[in-house]
Amino acid sequence: MRGTLVVLGAFLLASLGISYAKPDFAQEKPGSAEPKITPEDAAKKNPVPPTSDGLAEVRKLYSYNCAMCHGKIGDGKGDLAADMKLDLRDWRDGSSLDKLTDGELFWIISNGKGKMPGEGDRTKERVRWNFVNLVRSFARKDAGDKPKTESPLS
Ligand code: HEC
């Protein structure tokens, strides 16, 4: 008798587990909504350090694929953005991206967001991380990038 109860209990627990799991699966059904950034995505660290070679490589891609919206200098004033009446961030202002992590920028570049098309299918992961470096670099020029100890005489 006891044995039967244990088996029954295990069965009940298992079926509970299944019914708990259901809403999770339901959320991922296609067509319900746009894909969402998960906390794990947002926490991803950029594995690609910014180098002049890496930046030069994506700068070219940027001029073909991104500048028409985000502007050659990252000011968000590309022709297409104007045509589409998009209100884009001015990346030259360092604080414009303060609230977004590298992981979030990477995710948006990969998957797109709203009116922005994603790059995921046509560019390698390494290149997309370099896009993140490039996007961040628009603000760096006048934002505390000065050499610390160099004197004009040395
Ligand atoms: C059709 C115009 C368009 C093109 C082309 C485009 N974007 Fe965007 N991008 C947007 C819009 C609109 C947003 C804001 C999306 C939102 O928050 O709803 C955005 C947001 C972003 C963001 C998030 C930070 C922010 O400023 O909101 C990044 C990073 C980004 N774009 C990078 C790129 C890169 C890199 C490319 C080229 C590979 C690119 N975009 C091409 C329109 C565009």
Image (tube, grey):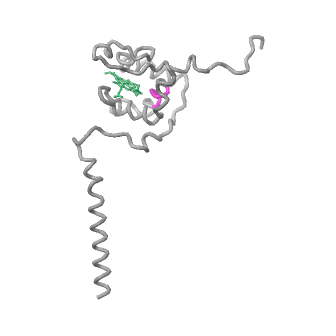
Q: Quadrant of ligand 1?
A: top left
- Residue at the spot 49% in from the left edge and 20% down from the top edge: 93
- Residue at the spot 39% in from the left edge and 43% down from the top edge: 38
Farthest residue to the bottom: give it.
1
Asked whether residue 121 is drawn in magenta, I would say: no
The secondary structure that most of the magenta stretch takes on is helix
Instruction: Pick the residue in front: 67 or 36.
Output: 36
Q: Position of residue 113 (x, y in %)?
A: 33, 31
Q: Position of residue 83 (x, y in %)?
A: 28, 13
**In the image, residue 112 above or below residue 36:** above
- Residue at the spot 26% in from the left edge and 40% down from the top edge: 33
Q: Position of residue 146 (x, y in %)?
A: 64, 18
Q: Position of residue 76 (x, y in %)?
A: 40, 17
- Residue at the spot 42% in from the left edge and 41% down from the top edge: 41
Quadrant of the frame with the C terminus: top right
- The part of the image, by quadrant, that contains residue 150 is top right
Image label count: 0
Farthest residue to the right: give it.
153
Q: Which residues are magenta?
A: 129-133
Q: Is residue 72 left or right of residue 3?
A: right
Instruction: Pick the residue in front: 57 or 106.
Output: 106
